């Protein structure tokens, strides 16, 4: 996979996220982020709210579903407002919403946060949510306090920083609607998906990828991933292949091997220990998989890195 053509996009997202201490989440309702597997892979860190607070709340299936439905309401408001606005979610999280418009229609939005301008209101909403869905309020509050920022950025800063991204995504959307696949679906109306369905697919696959990235060193299965994402195994398998061009097991192997390459290059850990750290209990099997991916054994890869240095 060649991600170099999207390296500038990732660098810009990383820069504004770290420089301004912003949590950025790109919400796609038309499929422009899924134009290519490389693009989706590059944008993955910014496709979901992956902070510990949000991840804890979404461990509840009902809250997961409500969060997805709430995104559609935000999209509807983007179509009405057609400009940057601030809002607060039912769990007490405040964010800026930056609409991504094309031909005066919202095709998605970027949420930027997370803030708390009124901690008392945020805590009230959070307590109410935890009582209703049987979540540990003290745990949720601790996670919330560790993530939110009491200082809110100005509208002007948000506008100036994100106008470039909005323009970039508009151009991606134009490429998307000019693609052969999109035109084919337009000719076959029965295959068209609603904005909510497109967003749900993108959201679930993004969460599946994040789950793999955080748990690749464990013996994870498609069943584990589907439980985490609150959907069926067949749904995960089909959409994973469709969006990323590879199966779930193949992606897990890819993540593990990439991590192993890093450890082989940057540490002196024994190969059997690296094997265990990336999720392979059998060093021989790890060596076989590594050779299939890289064209050389882990030992030879380490030697090649030492030679190049």
Image (cartoon, rainbow, N blue to C red):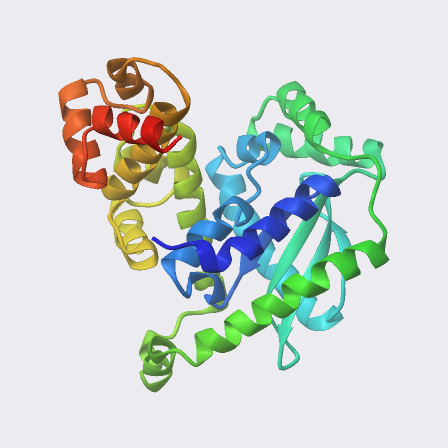
Residue at screen point 81% across, 36% down: 121
Q: Is residue 89 visible?
A: no
Q: Is residue 83 visible?
A: yes
Residue at screen point 36% across, 33% down: 308
As displayed, is residue 25 above or below residue 164? above
Residue 165 locus on image (x, y percent): 64, 62
Residue 204 locus on image (x, y percent): 42, 48
Question: The C terminus is located in which quarter?
Answer: top left
Q: Nearer the viewer, residue 116 or 10?
A: 10
Quadrant of the rendered image containing residue 232 = top left
Quadrant of the rendered image containing residue 114 = top right
Quadrant of the rendered image containing residue 110 = bottom right
Specify whether 25 is left or right of 259.
right
Q: How many numbered marks appear?
A: 0
Q: Nearer the viewer, residue 260 or 99?
A: 260
Residue 266 locus on image (x, y percent): 41, 24
As displayed, is residue 299 above or below residue 111? above
Q: Nearer the viewer, residue 306 or 244?
A: 306
Specify whether 57 is left or right of 222.
right
Q: Nearer the viewer, residue 131 or 1?
A: 1
Specify whether 221 is left or right of 214.
left
Specify whether 2 is left or right of 55.
left
């Amino acid at each position: 996979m060649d991600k170099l053509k999207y390296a500038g996009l990732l660098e810009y997202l990383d820069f504004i996220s770290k420089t301004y201490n912003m949590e950025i989440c790109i919400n796609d309702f038309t499929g422009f982020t899924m134009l290519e597997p490389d693009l989706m892979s590059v944008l993955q860190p910014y496709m979901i709210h992956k902070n510990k607070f949000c991840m804890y709340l979404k461990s509840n299936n009902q809250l997961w579903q409500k969060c997805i439905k709430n995104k559609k309401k935000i999209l509807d408001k983007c179509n009405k407002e057609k400009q940057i606005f601030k809002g607060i979610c039912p769990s007490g999280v405040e964010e800026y919403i930056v609409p991504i418009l094309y031909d005066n229609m919202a095709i998605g939005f970027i949420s930027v946060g997370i803030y708390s301008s009124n901690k008392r209101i945020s805590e009230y909403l959070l307590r109410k949510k935890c009582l209703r869905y049987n979540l540990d309020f003290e745990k949720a509050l601790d996670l919330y306090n560790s993530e939110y920022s009491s200082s809110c950025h100005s509208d002007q800063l948000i506008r100036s920083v994100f106008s470039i991204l909005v323009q970039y995504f508009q151009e991606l959307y134009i490429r998307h609607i000019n693609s052969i696949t999109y035109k084919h679906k337009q000719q076959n109306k029965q295959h068209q998906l609603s904005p909510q369905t497109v967003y749900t697919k993108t959201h679930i696959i993004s969460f599946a990828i994040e789950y793999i990235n955080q748990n690749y060193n464990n013996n994870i299965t498609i069943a584990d991933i589907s439980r985490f994402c609150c959907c069926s195994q067949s749904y995960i398998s089909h959409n994973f292949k469709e969006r990323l061009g590879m199966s779930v097991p193949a992606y897990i192997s890819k993540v593990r091997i990439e991590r192993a390459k890093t450890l082989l290059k940057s540490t002196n850990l024994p190969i059997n220990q690296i094997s265990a750290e990336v999720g392979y209990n059998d060093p021989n099997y790890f060596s076989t998989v590594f050779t299939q991916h890289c064209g050389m054994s882990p030992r030879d890869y380490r030697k090649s890195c030492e030679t190049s240095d």
